[in-house]
Image (spheres, rainbow, N blue to C red):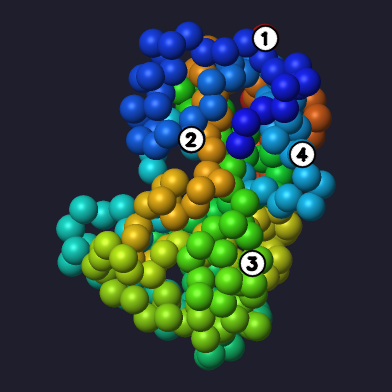
């Protein structure tokens, strides 16, 4: 996805730093633009939005070396991955009576989404439709370089699914396809089920405020260029992260605004109190 020739793109990262970041990310779709401000960050992606019909999803990693792999599949040992996958059933058993409105017995994906929301390792990976939300997450650890990833969900599903007219899977309309993923075990398999893009139910304040979306990962665990040709990564250098966070807060993207729970509001107010 080259930048438009007429775009006022930021200056480029020096070659040594770029090669280091590319090695960390582990794929060839890393952009060379140096992002020092929110305006430069937005300009890079605006240059990619040549076609108004294109839909992009974004994900921010505050460490550039992290792979696009969901939490249940990151464990090195197969038995541990197996326990992580089976933990959904235990979560359902424990939580069903505690929830005011629990998903139905056949709504497995909604249970999976709920478990992901509360931090249980699953086959889901969180994405957002919001450029600024992705940047916020990429800036959390200012000791290391981060990365903002972008994909076109339509292109991902066209490569992954046999019924290649599906832009984004819907948990109700495409329940049979999704169930194949939910029935998978812990083994990684070359040529197995590929990652797909799924539209979640926006059934919580957090997922609404973060404009959340999901990729659902099959037997090829980490998302890469082989599964998604549209995948790109924009480096977020550590020396600019604090400055970017301050600029994000000015436009309404910060902990208090994307995490609605009271403890996050208190964290925001505490930081305000402790400012010099």
Residue hosting label 2: 29
For the residues carrying marks 1 and 3, which lies nearer the camera in this image?
3
Camera-side residue: 127 or 143? 127
Task: Check residue 168 in the rendering and tell me which mark sits there, or answer none.
Answer: 3
> Is 206 located above or below residue 15 in the figure?
below
Question: Which disc, if any, is residue 90?
Answer: none
Q: Which of 244 and 259 lies nearest the eye of the viewer?
A: 244
Q: Are marks 2 and 3 in contact (CB under 8 Å)?
A: no
User: Mark 2 vs mark 3: which is more N-terminal?
Assistant: 2
Answer yes or no: do the residues labelled 1 and 3 have beta carbons within 8 Å? no
Q: CA gap, disc 2 to disc 3?
A: 22 Å
Q: Which residue lies at the image location 53% right of the left edge and 44% below the top edge?
A: 231
Question: Which type of secondary structure does the marked residue at label 2 adopt?
Answer: loop
Q: Relative to 117, is 26 on the left or the right? A: left
Label drawn at residue 50: 4
Which label's residue is closer to the chain start, 1 or 4? 4
Q: Where's residue 74, x and y in %?
A: 31, 53
Label 2: how many residues lie within 10 Å, few (<14), some (14-19) or many (20+)?
A: some
Q: Nearer the viewer, residue 52 or 74?
A: 52
């Amino acid at each position: 996805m080259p930048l438009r020739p007429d775009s006022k793109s930021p200056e480029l990262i020096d070659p040594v730093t770029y090669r280091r970041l590319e090695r960390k990310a582990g794929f060839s779709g890393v952009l060379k633009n140096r992002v020092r401000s929110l305006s430069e960050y937005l300009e890079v992606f605006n240059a990619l939005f040549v076609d108004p019909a294109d839909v992009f999803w974004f994900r921010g990693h505050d460490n550039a070396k992290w792979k696009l792999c969901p939490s249940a599949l990151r464990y090195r040992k197969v038995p541990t991955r197996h326990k992580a996958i089976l933990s959904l059933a235990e979560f359902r058993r424990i939580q069903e009576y505690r929830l005011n409105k629990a998903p139905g017995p056949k709504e497995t994906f909604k249970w999976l989404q709920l478990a992901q929301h509360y931090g249980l390792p699953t086959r889901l990976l969180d994405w957002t439709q919001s450029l600024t939300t992705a940047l916020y997450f990429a800036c959390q650890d200012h000791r290391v370089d981060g990365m903002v990833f972008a994909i076109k969900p339509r292109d991902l599903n066209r490569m992954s699914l046999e019924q290649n007219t599906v832009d984004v899977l819907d948990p109700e309309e495409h329940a049979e396809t999704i169930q194949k993923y939910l029935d998978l075990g812990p083994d990684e398999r070359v040529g197995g089920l590929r990652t797909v893009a799924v539209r979640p139910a926006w059934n919580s304040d957090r997922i609404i405020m973060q404009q959340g979306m999901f990729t659902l990962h099959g037997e090829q665990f980490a998302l890469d260029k082989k599964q998604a040709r549209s995948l790109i990564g924009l480096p977020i250098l550590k020396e600019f992260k604090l400055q970017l966070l301050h600029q994000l807060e000015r436009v309404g993207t910060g902990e208090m605004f994307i995490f609605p729970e009271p403890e996050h509001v208190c964290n925001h107010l505490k930081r305000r109190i402790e400012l010099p």
